[in-house]
Amino acid sequence: MILETIHVIDWKRTMQSPNCRITRRAVLIGAAQAGVAASVTSRYQPSLAAEPSASLPEYLVWDVHGHLNTPGETPAERIDNLLKFADRMGIERVIVFMGYPWAYDPSPEDVRRQNDQVLQALERSRGRAFGFAYLNPKHTEESLDEMDRCVRDGPMVGVKLWVAVRCHEKCLDPIVRHSARLKAPILQHTWYKITGNLPGESTAADLALLAARHPTASFIAAHAGGDWERGIRAIRSAANVTAEISGGDPTAGVVEMAVRELGAERVMYGSDFAGRSFASQLAKVLGANVPENAKRLILAGNIKRMLAPILATKGIRL
Amino acid sequence: MIVDVNVSLSRWPFRRLPCDELGRLIEKLGDCGVTEAWAGSFDGVFHKDIGSVNARLLDDCRRSRPGLLRPFGSVNPTLGGWREDLRRCHEDYHMPGIRLHPAYHGYRLDDPVFAELLTQAQRRGLIVQLVVRIEDPRMQHPLMRVPDVDTKPLPGLLTARPELRLVLLGALQSVRGQAITQLIRAGEVYFEISMLEGVGGISSLLGRVPGDRILFGSHCPFFILESATFKLQESELLRARANAITHQNARRLLKAPVVRQG
């Protein structure tokens, strides 16, 4: 019960903190001053032995997919640890969901406990982290209550669905309708595994079916379907689904295909930290052969646009 | 200055890759600050005419700026005549080492022919690159499912061959924890970072692997090269440590093998 009170904070004030933007330039200079060495040159990563060139493009980066699975006794320690690395990579904001430990089919009590952990991390982050409410759609009433607690009345700005139930099932409909009312996007884990999916693990095609039933809701296909060459194709015709590229290996060509097939406005950067590195996932975008304006949309522009309505309802200006 | 120990030429059969043409690959290497790359060939994974694969690899490496691409020829010990392929790599082509693909070539590391191959490579002073994984097994073509290499027999093989220099490519998703410790203790084994994952991955790896056994590897062009270079930035590395990983360890490895005592 103690945890329930933790999110009763002035979250509106902390989330719109005007001084939280971290520029890559500042990060790199700071790293150089700290004596960090990496004799690598690229547009994103200049030599740290000297101050970065002023002509290098600055990228605003929001990471839309992350977890608290990193060393630390408390959620506060864990988010501190994660943000330290985010700083090194020039990432301004992160979106966090699910606490620890995980379960494939969590009880309503477990879901609530994990969301409480995320709420603690959000408070600690002083506006650097947003949260999505983790739900198990098998428990419809409890899920709706949790959305009210964490999103409508709390600081969270979206919904995360994992592998408890495949997302084309009818039991998701009340959750999606409520999300649309709250203007909260739904980030759904999707993966095509040739080795076999979990019983409740959704594919990108499952998400396309759900999205077609709810054309006014906004969906994010986490991991771009895992096997992205199949996943991107599966959501091509689903205009309210955005591909999020986290979680897979940094295989060359993923962002090029996503931009070609979906348009840059329907592609988002996420890393799936801390299991994945910021580095490998950022490289998918920054190493891709796509226009600069596409990279800017993917790295932050699209998620800012998607979250703008719900942030407005909370009185938050970025 | 970066020595990338895990680069491949030619084409992956299931997907066109943005840098699967030699000119594009060389351009990418330059853009990312790679001054030297140890190159194998995707053809060496799939072709049976290994002799022509290695001859083409040598030609391609010679077409690049001198010293940029170092060829590592493929040897498939399940094919008759593999000893001649090995001899050519060493005596005719003067390659510094060879690249092995046990999972794709269909043999286990407890197969006696693998032990013989290691013995001959050691005798010739060749570096052996062993590819543990190329592609996430969850995402492979349904008609081409290839498991990771089971490395359990390696410690025993290394202990018996103290002068062998072994570089594991694409190993750090499947070789973890105690298995890494056993390999490090068993012999001259090195790991590259292309498949290293997790926030602050290199910092974490340094808790398990001595800094002089970690090499820069990108798995380019299959992977995006920047993935490896950005990892150097994500972890807080002292300059000396970063230099060791990016090039000094590889340069030392290229020199004549050190005879281990005991």
Image: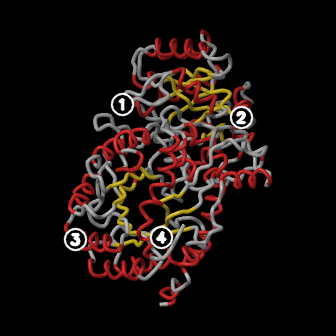
- The answer to whether marks 3 and 1 mark residues whose Cβ atoms lie closer than 8 Å is no
Badges 2 and 1, same chain:
yes
- Helix, strand or loop at label 4? It is strand
Report the Cα–Cα distance between label 4 and label 3. 23 Å
Where residue A198 appears, as percent x and y from the top left, is 30, 58
Tag 2: residue type?
A: His
Tag 4: residue type?
A: Gly
- Helix, strand or loop at label 2? It is helix
- The answer to whether marks 2 and 4 mark residues whose Cβ atoms lie closer than 8 Å is no
Label 1: which residue?
B14
Badges 4 and 3, same chain:
yes
Number of other residues with Cα within 10 Å of mark 3, as a class: few under 14, some 14 to 19, many 20 or more: some
Residue B234 to residue A74: above or below: above
Residue A91 to residue B3: above or below: below
Q: Quadrant of residue B33?
A: top right
Where residue A228 appears, as percent x and y from the top left, is 36, 44
Label 4: which residue?
A131
Report the Cα–Cα distance between label 2 and label 4. 41 Å
Which mark, residue A171? 3
| Subunit under mark 4 | A
Label 2: which residue?
B247
Where residue B70 appears, as percent x and y from the top left, is 62, 21
Pick the residue in front: A3 or A237.
A237
What residue lies at 59% left-to-right and 57% top-to-bottom? A91
Where residue B150 appears, as percent x and y from the top left, is 46, 42
Pick the residue in front: B68 or B226.
B226
| Subunit under mark 1 | B
